[in-house]
Amino acid sequence: MDQKKITILGSTGSIGTQALEVVRRLGYHVEAVCANTSVELVERQVREFSPRYAAMMDPRAAADLKARLADTPTKVLCGMEGFCQAAASPENDLVLNSVVGMIGLRPTLAAIEAGVDVALANKETLVAAGQLVMEAARRKKIRILPVDSEHSAIFQCLQGNPNPGALHKIILTASGGPFFGKTRAQLEQVTVQEALRHPNWVMGAKLTIDSSTLMNKGLEVIEASWLFQQPVDRIEVVVHRESVIHSMVEYVDGSCIAQLGVPDMQIPIQYAMTYPNRVESDVKRLSLVDYGKLTFYPPDLDTFRCLRVCIDAARMGGLYPCAANAANEEAVDLFRQGKIRFLQIGELVEQAAFANRLPLDYALEDVFAAEEQARHYVREHYR
């Protein structure tokens, strides 16, 4: 098996640390690790994997790391410029982008412009600027390989189908989060701690809260639309509590193909790294007998408003998904600080997403303008 060189953006988060476990098992080389402020963990990663670069978004963290790594040959980079430099390294075979939020956009574009394939776990890249990213990927002839379990499942279900016209629809599964079946009245007093108790997956705080509001699924609908070049009305969301079927596709002849497995992110991470090959892994094997039954339900778009907002924003196109995503990032931050209630997240996202007329065709600077406009709206209207 080829010795690939991998750069990991977000190396200290849930996806990043699991990616390093996969790298360790595969014997791949780490070209760069990039994080925000977790200096001690990045230092341990550098000392184990000896990457060419280590980048910290926070300047003080970068200075601290540089002092700690003075005895190593690893070059410490800083800020967005450092992330982009690491992503664009000519030595990269693959950049795995697992950072959370809009900060993932510029490094993704930097990797693409350098002609490097991208394994994408950062939803916001395609949600905020899918048109720009996909056009750049086509122009540079690079592959964007999905890492999210749902998009990896769809990608796998489409393998071996040479005719794009044969696809009827995508069926995107959702766990339903910790509040499945709850009414709006029951969610009035939800705490941050309750929103962080996901039934199936271990994820970072922001992503876990997004799952509790179904915003995460809304972002995945938009991302799937770009990745697989399908209109949003041909993407169906189904709540599947057991998280065994990670997603499905339905073909024009009525056949449905699903990808199944235990809820373990190392499976899609490894497939993105080894594609088009499959290799052994040590994840737990699926036993359908142990589960006994699999259940499916329609999503509640009235209670979980964020999912509906994302679908509506995707239908409108342009920068409306960007505004919805930025508003959500700001609202989730306010919720985690105790400044707004749980249900206000969806209310603010809906208001901010459609508060302004936004362009349908856009350049990169328009993306960041729409982002700031939506964030400003949330900050001004949350009280």
Image (cartoon, rainbow, N blue to C red):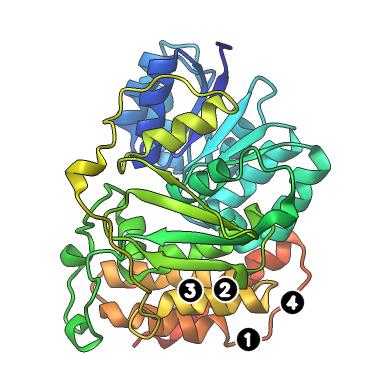
Q: Residues within 10 Å of mark 3 (few under 14, many from 20)?
A: many
Which three-letter amino acid code belongs to the residue tagged 1?
Asn
Report if the CB atoms under discs 4 and 3 are less than 8 Å apart. Answer: no
Q: Residue 9: image x %, image y %?
A: 50, 37
Q: Secondary structure at mark 4?
A: loop
Q: Is residue 7 left or right of residue 338?
A: right
**Residue at (54% x, 75% y) in the render:** 311
Disc 1 and disc 2 in contact, CB within 8 angstroms: yes
**In the image shown, does 177 or 124 lie closer to the viewer?**
177
Q: Give the Cα distance between marks 3 and 2.
A: 6 Å
* Three-letter code, disc 3: Ala
CA separation, marks 1 and 4? 10 Å
Residue denoted by label 2: 323
Q: Which residue is mark 3?
A: 327
Residue carrying label 4:
359
Residue at the location (74% across, 32% down)?
A: 115
Report, in whole angstroms, how far the alpha carbon at label 4 lies from the one at label 2: 11 Å
| CA distance for labels 1 and 2 | 9 Å
| Amino acid type for the residue under numbered disc 4 | Pro
* CA gap, disc 4 and disc 3: 17 Å
CB contact under 8 Å: marks 3 and 2: yes
User: Residues at badges 4 and 2 in contact (C-beta under 8 Å)?
Assistant: no
Q: Which three-letter amino acid code belongs to the residue tagged 2?
A: Ala
Considering the numbered disc 2 on the image, is that residue within a helix, a strand or a loop? Answer: helix
Residue that carries the numbered disc 1 in the rendered image: 356
Q: How busy is the neighbourhood of tag 2: few (under 14 within 10 Å), some, or many (20 plus)?
A: many
Where residue 24 appears, as percent x and y from the top left, is: 39, 17
Say whether disc 4 or disc 2 marks the residue closer to the N-terminus: 2
Q: Secondary structure at mark 3?
A: helix
